[in-house]
Amino acid sequence: MLESSPSFVPDPANDRVYLGLYQLKEPPFTITPDPEYLYLSNTHQSALEKILYGIRTRLGFMMLTGEVGTGKTTLCRHILDTLGATIRTVYIINPSLSGTELLGSILDDLEIPYGAEASKKERIEQLNHFLLNCENDRPVVVIIDDAQTMPVETLEDLRLLSNLETDKIKLLQVLLVGQPELVEMIGKAELRQLRQRIALHSRLELLDRRDAEEYISRRLYASGNRGRLKFSSQAVALVHKQSGGIPRLMNRICDYALMAGYVDNLYTIGPDQVRRALKETAGLSIEAPLEPIGRSVLGKGMLFAAGTVLGLTFFYLLVIWGGFDTNALLIRMGSALVSILD
């Protein structure tokens, strides 16, 4: 029984104890945005290709959105690694700034001198001067992570940077990265000018069942596994169901499942190990799946039972007291129950 299983809560101060048993060089399911562990599903591959195209052709403003934990930051790190020394980059991870502060952060990362008391206009002029001097050199790319946390006023100030251009190209490439709320923010009437300047929008979708299996295998391989350790298809299905296809949650479940596998001395992680992992993972429960159940079979059964009881009661009253045609009533009741189940 689950209650009698040994405890396997990992000690965050030490390396995972299962590394030696499974001969892994490092934990495969950490939640840090390591590009080495990036799994390119169809949606991630599409987003990567679009953004790289947008940067190389200097489209200007671009946007990448996706649910929490879908791998936006990891994808951005991969983009930076891919482009390497061919671009100059500014990476802003805390964009809850005023427009003036944001401009200061951009200038600081590009090592452009400016006065501490420089106005917004003066900072933009300094940036424009720098961009004009390196126009035919490496493009400058500003990536703003968690952009949904930016004040509306700062987003409006950001629009001013879209005016930094020549007759031929945009001098500054800006990638706004954020959760779905960012789309709602950009949709505000006061930001319509910024919205019109976004030349490209990519969205990361959740992983499907096949993606989940490939994702787990990819991370195991990247950590040093060469086929000795694996998750059974039933285990993968349970991980996918309980995580809702969100990579970050999959990592948490799989990490604990490996701890359970270590305790059981197993090289094939099965649904039992995943269930034990779920008991140790705060916020996840096999009794309360992350995905909405909606009108489940159970829900329909309850509706059917309630409808049957009410229908029979109504039928009895009509026949006894009203003298109605029994056959006609049965037909009408059958139609009503069908509509309830539909």
Image: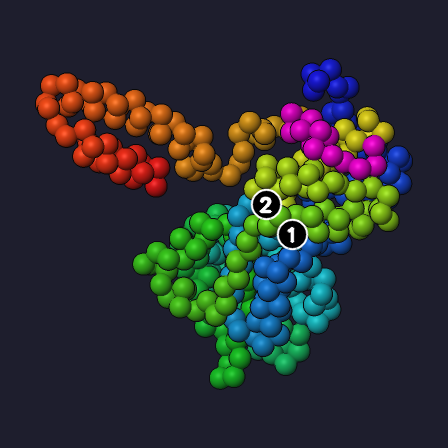
**Closest to the observer, 238 or 18:** 238
Instruction: Inspect the image, locate mark 2, and give the three-letter code of the amino acid beneath it.
Output: Gly
> Which residue is situated farthest in the top direction here?
4
Residue 152 vertical position relative to residue 289 in the rendered view, above or below: below
Image marks 2 and 1: residues in contact by CB distance under 8 Å: yes
Dot 2 or dot 1, earlier in sequence: 1
* On-image quarter of the C terminus: top left
Q: Which residues are magenta?
A: 266-279
Mark number, residue 245:
2
Please identify the quarter of the rendering in which residue 196 is found: bottom left
Residue 44 vertical position relative to residue 341 in the rendered view, above or below: below
Please identify the quarter of the rendering in which residue 131 is found: bottom right
Q: Please indicate, yes or no, whether residue 163 appears anywhere in the rendered image.
A: yes
On whether residue 274 falls in the magenta region, the answer is: yes
> Residue drawn at (67%, 35%), measured in percent from left and top?
253
Q: Please indicate, yes or no, whether residue 125 appears anywhere in the rendered image.
A: no
**Closest to the observer, 19 or 275:** 275
> Residue drawn at (48%, 47%), measured in percent from left and top?
149
Where does the image place residue 84, in percent across and percent down from the top left? 73, 66
Q: Tell me: 183 left or right of 51.
A: left
Where does the image place residue 40, in percent across and percent down from the top left? 67, 58
> Residue drawn at (41%, 57%), measured in percent from left and top?
186
Residue at mark 2 to residue at mark 1: CA–CA distance: 9 Å
Mark 2 neighbour density, 10 Å: few (under 14) some (14–19) many (20 or more): many
* On-image quarter of the N terminus: top right
Mark number, residue 211:
1
> Residue drawn at (11%, 19%), measured in percent from left and top?
321
Prevalent SS, magenta region? helix
